[in-house]
Amino acid sequence: MPSRSVGTKQSIEYIKKLIVEEARRQGVPEYLALAVAAQESGFNNVAVSKKNKDGSRDHGVFQLNDRYHKLKNVYNP
């Protein structure tokens, strides 16, 4: 579970709305995208995990690892 937060936290309702919209656009079952977000961050868009063994951290609603999002140029909306 995330240990700290940075940035501006959005409401859970707003985050769920964004997830459902994007899931539809990407052809991902809505229930699956919502379940992953609930498990990973509790819909906390500013969640940041404790440091992993390699020093990286996981960020955002889906807890993307910073090694990945820096590599792929992925940011929060």
Image: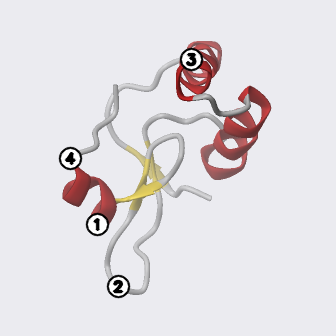
- Identify the amino acid type marked 3: Ser
- Identify the amino acid type marked 2: Asp
Return the residue nearer the eye: 5 or 44: 44
Look at the picture and state if 19 lies above or below 50.
Answer: above
In which quadrant will I find the C terminus?
top left
- Which residue has dot 4 on it? 73
- Identify the amino acid type marked 4: Asn
Look at the picture and state if 36 lies above or below 58.
Answer: above
Q: Earlier in the sequence, mark 4 or mark 2?
A: 2
Dot 3: within a 10 Å radius of its alpha carbon, few (fewer than 14), some, or many (20 or more) residues? Answer: few
Q: Earlier in the sequence, mark 3 or mark 4?
A: 3
Q: Earlier in the sequence, mark 1 or mark 3?
A: 3
Indicate which disc residue 47 carries. Answer: none
- Identify the amino acid type marked 1: Arg
- Which residue has dot 3 on it? 11
Q: How is the image coloured?
A: secondary structure
Q: Earlier in the sequence, mark 1 or mark 2?
A: 2
Instruction: Determine the secondary structure under disc 1.
Output: helix
- Which residue has dot 1 on it? 67
Residue 68, x across and y down, in percent: 32, 61
Contact? badges 1 and 3 (CB < 8 Å): no
Distance Cα–Cα, label 2 vs label 3: 31 Å
Return the residue nearer the eye: 44 or 65: 65
- Which residue has dot 2 on it? 54
Looking at the image, is mark 3 or mark 4 nearer the viewer? 4
